[in-house]
C-alpha cells in the first residue's frame, strides 16, 4: 500500500511516498529556516504564504521521485493537528482537493504521534541514501518525543494504543534551546547552534538546576532557562534587571561555549533521567526518540549509555518535520481507522495526542 504524506504544520512544506509503512520511496522537504532566521523564530503569516507558494511543486516532486503516478497511490495522509493554523490549512486543503479529484482515501494524522513513526521506516528505494534503522521497533514501545513544541514520554502498546505518561509542565525542551541560544547570541534555530557551541565548552563549567516535580515522568525547563539568564547576567557584571536582549553583545566566546555546554548537558540529563525511570518501571521491548531534538548527538550518546538495550536511531533527516513520518503513520492508521471525509476535515491547531 503506497501512501502519499503531506506535512505543513509549521515551517517545512513536505511530501513523501511510503510503501507499507516502512519503505521510503521519496522524501521532499522545502525548509523555511533561512526565511525565519532573521526574525529569530517562525512568523506564522510568512510561513503560511511560503507553504502556499510551494505546496504543489513539492507534492509533484515527491510523486516523480517515487516514480509514481496517481494510479500508483493508494491513499493520502495529511497533518491536521497540532500546529500553526494557517500552515495546517494549506496542507489539508491540498490533501482534501487531491483526495476528491483522484478519488483517494484520506487519513488525518496527528503530527506529534507521527514523529514516532520515523523510527518505523527501515527500507528505502535505490535513489535514497539515508542511514535507516535496521528493523522496526517492537511493542510495547517507550517513546521520548522532544521538539520545539513538545516534550513527552509516551508508552505504546500497539499502533493507535498509547498512554501519555509524562510531559513538560512549561517550556518544551526545543523551545528552551531556542531561548537560551538567543540569550547567548547564537543563531536560530537554537538546537543546532547550541550543540555546535557546546563542543567547544565545558559541560561542568556551570552547575544548573534540574526541576523536582510531583509527576514522576514529567519535565520542566523554564527554571533551567531562567537559571541560564541569571548566570549570564552575573558573569557579565549585570543584575537581574538588565535586559536579556542586550546580553549577547557582552558575552565572550568562552562564556558562550561553556554556558551552551552546561545548558545542553543539564537539559539532556533531565530527559535521559526521566526516560531511564520510565524504562525501569515499564520494561518496554523498545525505546525510540522522536522530534527535532532527537537529532541532538549528545542526547543520543547519553541515552545509549543510560539504557541496557540497543537503540536504533532514525536518521537526522527524519527527526525534524517531514512527510515520510506522516505517510508511515498513515499506513498504520489505515489499518485501524476509517478514511476521513475530505469535505469535512478541519484542522485542530492545539489538539493533544491524548485527544486523538
Image (spheres, helix red, strand yellow):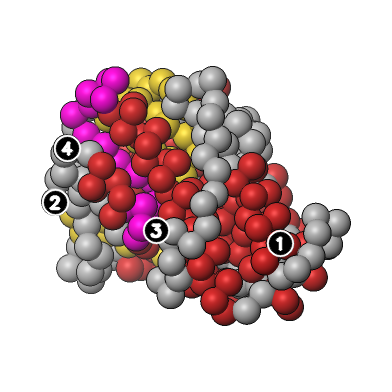
Is residue 76 in view?
no
Q: Nearer the viewer, mark 4 or mark 2?
A: 4
Please identify the quarter of the rendering in which residue 259 is found. bottom right
Residue at mark 4: 308
Which element type, helix, strand or loop, lies under badge 1? helix
Please identify the quarter of the rendering in which residue 335 is found. top left
Q: Nearer the viewer, mark 1 or mark 2?
A: 1
Residue 277, above or below 268 = above
Disc 3 + disc 2, Cβ < 8 Å: no
User: How far across and down, in percent of the image, does residue 69 sit?
Assistant: 34, 59
Residue at mark 2: 134
> For residue 299: magenta?
yes
Q: Residue at x 31, y 33 (%)?
A: 276
User: How far across and down, in percent of the image, does residue 55 sit?
Assistant: 56, 62
Instruction: State how far apart marks 4 and 1 are (Cα).
Output: 40 Å
What range is drawn magenta here? 280-300
Residue at mark 1: 234
Instruction: State how far apart marks 4 and 2 are (Cα).
Output: 19 Å
Amino acid at each position: 500500500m503506497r501512501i502519499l504524506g503531506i506535512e505543513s504544520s509549521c515551517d517545512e512544506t513536505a511530501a513523501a511516498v511510503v510503501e507499507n509503512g516502512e519503505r521510503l520511496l521519496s522524501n521532499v522537504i522545502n525548509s523555511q529556516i533561512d526565511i525565519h532566521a532573521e526574525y529569530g523564530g517562525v512568523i506564522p503569516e510568512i510561513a503560511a504564504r511560503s507553504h502556499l507558494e510551494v505546496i504543489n511543486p513539492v507534492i509533484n516532486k515527491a510523486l516523480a521521485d517515487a516514480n509514481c503516478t496517481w494510479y500508483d497511490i493508494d491513499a493520502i495522509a495529511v497533518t491536521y493537528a497540532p500546529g500553526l493554523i494557517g500552515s495546517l490549512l494549506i496542507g489539508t486543503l491540498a490533501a482534501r482537493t487531491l483526495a476528491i479529484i483522484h478519488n483517494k482515501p484520506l487519513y488525518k494524522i496527528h503530527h506529534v504521534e507521527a514523529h514516532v513513526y520515523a523510527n518505523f521506516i527501515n527500507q528505502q528505494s535505490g535513489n535514497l541514501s539515508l542511514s535507516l534503522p535496521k528493523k522496526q521497533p517492537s511493542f510495547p514501545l517507550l517513546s521520548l518525543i522532544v521538539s520545539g513544541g513538545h516534550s513527552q514520554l509516551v508508552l505504546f502498546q500497539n499502533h493507535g494504543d498509547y498512554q501519555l505518561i509524562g510531559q513538560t509542565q512549561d517550556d518544551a525542551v526545543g523551545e528552551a534551546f531556542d531561548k537560551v541560544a538567543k540569550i547567548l547570541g547564537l543563531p536560530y534555530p537554537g538546537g543546532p547552534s547550541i550543540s555546535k557551541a557546546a563542543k567547544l565548552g565545558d559541560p561542568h563549567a556551570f552547575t544548573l538546576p534540574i526541576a523536582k516535580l510531583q509527576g514522576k515522568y514529567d519535565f520542566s525547563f523554564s527554571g533551567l532557562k531562567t537559571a541560564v539568564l541569571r548566570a549570564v547576567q552575573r558573569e557579565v557584571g549585570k543584575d537581574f534587571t538588565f535586559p536579556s536582549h542586550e546580553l549577547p553583545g557582552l558575552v565572550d566566546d568562552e562564556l558562550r561555549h561553556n554556558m551552551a555546554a552546561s545548558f545542553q548537558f543539564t537539559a539532556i540529563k533531565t530527559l535521559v533521567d526521566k526516560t531511564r525511570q520510565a524504562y525501569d518501571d515499564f520494561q518496554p521491548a523498545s525505546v525510540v526518540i522522536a522530534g527535532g531534538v532527537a537529532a541532538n548527538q549528545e542526547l543520543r550518546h547519553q541515552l545509549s549509555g543510560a539504557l541496557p538495550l540497543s537503540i536504533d536511531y532514525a536518521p537526522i533527516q527524519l527527526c525534524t518535520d517531514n512527510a515520510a513520518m506522516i505517510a508511515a503513520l498513515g499506513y498504520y492508521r489505515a489499518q485501524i481507522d476509517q478514511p476521513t471525509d475530505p469535505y469535512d476535515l478541519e484542522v485542530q491547531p492545539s489538539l493533544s495526542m491524548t485527544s486523538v
